[in-house]
Image (spheres, grey):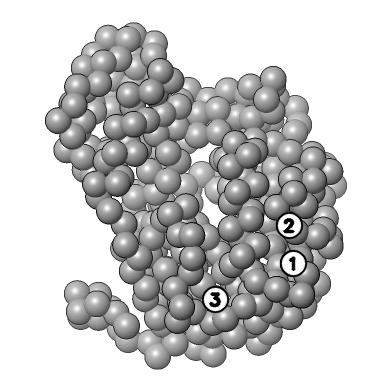
Amino acid sequence: MLSPDVSQARPQCRNFHLHRLALSPQDQTEEILQGLQAPQKRLPPKLFYDTRGSRLFDTITRLPEYYLTRTECELLHNHLPQLQALIGTTGTLLEPGSGSSDKARLLLDGKHLAAYVPIEISTEYFIDTALELAQSYPGLQIHALCGDFMQLSALPDNLPPPPRTVFFPGSTIGNFEPALAVQLLRRFRSWAGPGGGLLIGVDTRKDTGVLHRAYNDREGVTAAFNLNMLSHVNRLTGANFQLERFTHKAFYNGQVGRIEMHLQSLCAQSVRVAGHTIQFRAGETIHTENSYKYEPARFTALAQSAGFRPLHCWLDSRGYFSLHYFVTDQ
């Protein structure tokens, strides 16, 4: 059921179900402080996605340099009948970190699914998107979960039962260190249940110039997206980050096969965060994101170690991106 504030502001849909998951501001603040007090300062990528950050990311996906979304959508279009048949065997599509749900819409067309379960941390932006989906697909049950899927070890009991297909596009799995990626894939396996599936997009290793341009676009949208994280931290913790004192930095680390995004301090400065003073040296960085790139065989091995069995792998003509479908055994 919608909470009263939401129901008064938005139209009702019988096929729309809102689940607000507990998210402790204290836990968030502790996580932020722990990261900023580490030898290599860091902030978790989930902090990108307040309302403005979510909209900026939607813009990034349409930039000419950002090949990932275009290439993945091409793969989804090219194999759509087969993908719809595969996820139709489970009846439910579950998408952690769903954002605008644009890619999911491709899979939702037709009458092969009974339910769609998006999970997103950016509440107001997310609710509007999920409600619009419910209006666009009146025959589909939409269960919108507002919360951090990284803190969600078990799903609410009142969701459609397994089997489910977990949809994790955009190479978001690359944000996690390989060992953490395996842990997350194991969680996805439990959510899919016996007879379930995993449809996942994975960026591949390629020319470093292509990778550099994708994360350093000429319009500066990715830079604004990265810097917006500090605005989000200011609101969450009462911090006094001054965005003009930091700059966006993104580069490919070939030794470990990942893009790294950082926010670099332009000067020596002190920042107050939740009553604590954080000192920055000139040139010191906050590590905000990794994006690991995997060859298909390497990623398949990673998923197998989490208990999935490979069924299909599709690559675009340039080998820029891979789309995998894994299954869980009955």
Residue 215: % across, % down: 56, 32
Residue 98: % across, % down: 50, 61
Q: Are marks 3 and 1 in contact (CB under 8 Å)?
A: no
- Residue 239 sits in quarter: top left
- Residue 177 sits in quarter: top right
Q: Is residue 178 above or below residue 253?
A: below
- The quadrant of the image that shows the N terminus is bottom left
Residue position for label 3: 116
Q: Secondary structure at mark 1?
A: loop
Label 3 or label 1, whichever comes before in sequence order: 3
Residue 74: % across, % down: 73, 57
Instruction: Give the Cα distance between marks 1 and 2.
Output: 7 Å
Identified by mark 1, the residue type is Thr
Label 3 or label 2, whichever comes before in sequence order: 3
Label 1 or label 2, whichever comes before in sequence order: 2
Residue at image position (64%, 30%) is 258
Q: Badge 1: few (under 14), some or many (20 or more) residues near its Cα, within 10 Å?
A: some
Any part of residue 106 in sight: no
Residue position for label 2: 307
Query: Is 283 on the left-hand or right-hand side of 260?
Result: left
Residue position for label 1: 328
Task: Report the mark closest to the observer, 3 or 2.
Answer: 2
